[in-house]
Image (cartoon, rainbow, N blue to C red):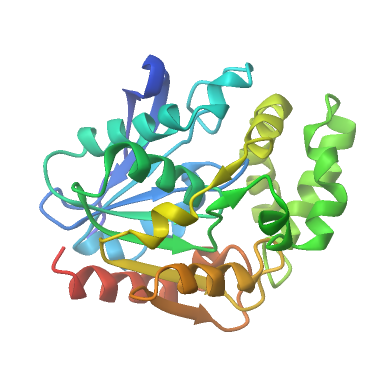
Amino acid sequence: MTHTLSIREIRGGGGLALRLLETGPASGPTILFLHGFSQSGAIWHRQFEGELTADHRLAALDLRGHGGSAKLLEPTAYSDGSLWADDVAAAIDALGNRPVVLVAWSYGGLVACDYLRQHGGARLAGLVFAGALTRLGDETALSLLGPQVLSYVGSLFAPDMATVVPALLRFIQECHARPVNERELYELLGYNCIVPSEVRAALFSRQVNNDDLLRELQIPTMVLHGSADDVVLPAAAKRLASLMPAARVSMLEGVGHCLFREAPEVFDQVLRDFVKANGC
């Protein structure tokens, strides 16, 4: 059964306009996806077009500064964790009163932690960290990022597109363990190019340590990671597992940072099993 994709505007932290994508039956378990650095909610299209939509309600938020959401250029619009937290809270509110499974990819892991720190886990049925960051801005955090990404990350903040575009193309390719075909490469480049360089710089300048939060986390949690991830290294998943010994950990072999794109059937099945196991 094919479900209609709905796109609506909600108001997040500080009243910022955010775009929320949604599909699937309203009666199904609800999954809210948070994308990564310089991306868009549209990056989850393989989930939105796959079998999960037969019996799950799927939603994807365009993070502030990304996709169809408002793009303020002031760094303070991105440095305050409570604003990110309220963005996620607004999306959960828009999805109704049922508990939500939150799936946080890459930089989305930081945003999920912002939400948990401010609002707690009462409205979450479960949490999935997929190739996720939960710490940023110190030596430990940098050690979990691929050295090749760190070698050119400064180019992603440049004011001129002649510098930014080659760096973005390299970043997109390195998010995948296998080559990306030309059509998809330029589709992904489009997601990335509409994010202002000022936003990317503000995101990367945050200093966040969520180790204390994760050690006390009480909701069902799963850690998913690609064994061939060269952007957020597999060591990040092992570190999360050490902080959350009750969490389920799944390493997808031979898959890179975009694990939900490279292995959508496996990713979706693992996610389906997690949702079912936790009675969502």
Counting every numbered tag in the picture gives 0
In the rendered structure, the answer to whether residue 128 lies left or right of residue 37 reads left
Q: Nearer the viewer, residue 246 or 228?
A: 246
Horizontal and vertical percent for residue 123?
A: 19, 47
Name which residue lies at 42% across and 40% down: 114
Q: Where 269 falls versus 209 (above or below)?
A: below
Quadrant where the N terminus lies? bottom left
Q: Quadrant of residue 97?
A: top left
Question: From this viewpoint, is residue 252 visible?
Answer: yes
Question: From this viewpoint, is residue 182 visible?
Answer: no
Q: Nearer the viewer, residue 117 or 174?
A: 117
| Residue farthest along the bottom direction in this orientation | 253
Q: Quadrant of residue 61?
A: top left
In the rendered structure, the answer to whether residue 243 lies left or right of residue 229 reads left
Q: Nearer the viewer, residue 43 or 237?
A: 237
In the rendered structure, the answer to whether residue 24 lies left or right of residue 236 reads left
Q: Quadrant of residue 86?
A: top left
Name which residue lies at 41% across and 26% down: 18
Q: Where 239 falls versus 114 (above or below)?
A: below
Horizontal and vertical percent for residue 187?
A: 64, 46
Horizontal and vertical percent for residue 67?
A: 53, 33
Name which residue lies at 63% across and 21% down: 75
In the rendered structure, the answer to whether residue 248 lies left or right of residue 209 reads left
Quadrant where the C terminus lies? bottom left
Horizontal and vertical percent for residue 132?
A: 53, 59
Q: Where 45 falls versus 51 (above or below)?
A: above
Name which residue lies at 30% across and 43% down: 22
